[in-house]
Image: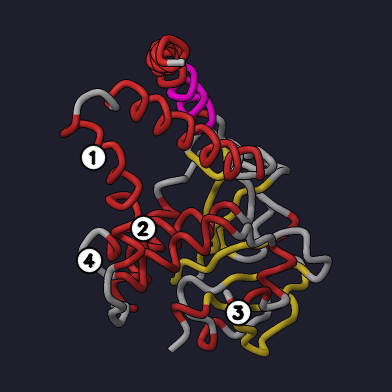
């Protein structure tokens, strides 16, 4: 019996490096993909657990390393256990707009949400999460939990227009994008087309940014510009709830 146990322990220790290698490669591949989808969400969780199991298998014989490996999940959970604090909405809005501008020229990829490719709804989601991450890094538990919720629950253009999960609020403003009174629109507001298939984001000073499948990239232009038919379409204006004063 003891011989069998020793054999099992040796087998587990031999599996450790393999688990670490394969799970690390899987994580790198998932992050490299531009897509934000179920494969990314569930794949990262599965690969992360496999990586943790591999580290635990290697560290098990060493008391100090074993407890460090066991405590690793708690360390990762700390940002989401931080005390709730009020968000700095002005700073959040500024960082959100700045982040979206940084995607200018990025190629359009349906389902994408990174600098390697992004789609229309991925652009405001990525911008908002970048802004939330900045405040979470300074110890704001509210921002950390909102970041995680936003990352897990994909918000399409249709979901934005329909206030899905309370992520957005409707403003009551709608109509031809060229004729909308911009005095009622705030920088960061979302203009969702009436067919709920596309979204543009107001940057201020009459400029709208979008990831346009027609031009195949992210660009900024004024309403009515011939660069994109969406800039002359009927839209409804909504706003991220965390930016709604």
Q: CA distance from mark 2 to mark 1?
A: 42 Å
Apparent side of residue 44 relative to residue 54 in the rendered image (left or right): right
Q: CA distance from mark 2 to mark 3?
A: 24 Å
Asked which secondary structure carries label 4, the reply is loop
Q: Residue at x 43, y 17 (%)?
A: 5
Asked which secondary structure carries label 3, the reply is helix
**Residue 91 place in picture, x, y as percent:** 28, 72
Which label lies toward us, 4 or 1?
Answer: 1
Question: Callout 4: few (<14), some (14-19), or many (20+) C-alpha neighbours within 10 Å?
Answer: some
Q: CA distance from mark 4 to mark 1?
A: 25 Å
Badge number at residue 147: none
Residue 132 picture quarter? bottom left
Which label lies toward us, 4 or 3?
Answer: 4
Apparent side of residue 123 relative to residue 180 in the rendered image (left or right): left
User: Which of the two discs, 2 and 3, labels the residue nearer the N terminus?
Assistant: 2
Is 230 drawn above or below residue 16 in the view shown?
A: below
Region in magenta: 22-30
Question: Callout 1: few (<14), some (14-19), or many (20+) C-alpha neighbours within 10 Å?
Answer: few
Q: CA distance from mark 4 to mark 3?
A: 24 Å
User: Which of the two discs, 4 and 1, labels the residue nearer the N terminus?
Assistant: 1
Residue 236 picture quarter? bottom right
Evaluate if marks 2 and 1 touch, with contact meaning CB atoms under 8 Å apart. no
Is 126 drawn above or below residue 168 in the view shown?
A: above
Which label lies toward us, 4 or 2?
Answer: 4
Badge number at residue 98: 2
Question: Callout 2: few (<14), some (14-19), or many (20+) C-alpha neighbours within 10 Å?
Answer: some
Badge number at residue 166: 3
Badge number at residue 67: 1
Report the residue marked by disc 4. 139
Q: Residue at x 45, y 74 (%)?
A: 187
User: Which of the two discs, 1 and 3, labels the residue nearer the N terminus?
Assistant: 1
């Amino acid at each position: 019996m003891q011989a069998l146990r020793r054999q099992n322990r040796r087998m587990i220790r031999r599996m450790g490096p393999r688990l670490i290698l394969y799970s690390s490669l899987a994580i790198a591949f998932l992050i490299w993909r531009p897509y934000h989808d179920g494969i990314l969400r569930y794949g990262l969780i599965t690969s992360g657990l496999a990586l943790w199991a591999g580290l635990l298998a290697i560290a098990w014989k060493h008391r100090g390393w074993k407890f460090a490996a066991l405590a690793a999940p708690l360390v990762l959970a700390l940002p989401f256990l931080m005390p709730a604090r009020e968000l700095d909405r002005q700073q959040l809005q500024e960082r959100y707009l700045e982040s979206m501008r940084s995607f200018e020229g990025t190629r359009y990829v349906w389902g994408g949400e990174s600098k390697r490719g992004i789609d229309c709804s991925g652009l405001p989601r990525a911008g908002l999460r970048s802004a939330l991450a900045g405040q979470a890094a300074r110890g704001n538990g509210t921002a950390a939990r909102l970041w995680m919720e936003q990352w897990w629950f994909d918000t399409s253009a249709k979901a934005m227009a329909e206030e899905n999960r309370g992520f957005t609020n409707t403003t009551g403003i709608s109509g031809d994008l060229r004729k909308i009174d911009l005095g009622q629109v705030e920088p960061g507001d979302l203009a969702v087309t009436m067919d709920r298939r596309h979204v543009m984001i107001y940057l201020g000073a009459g400029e709208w940014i979008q990831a346009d499948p027609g031009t195949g990239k992210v660009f900024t232009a004024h309403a009515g510009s011939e660069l994109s038919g969406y800039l002359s379409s009927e839209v409804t204006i909504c706003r991220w709830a965390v930016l709604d004063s």
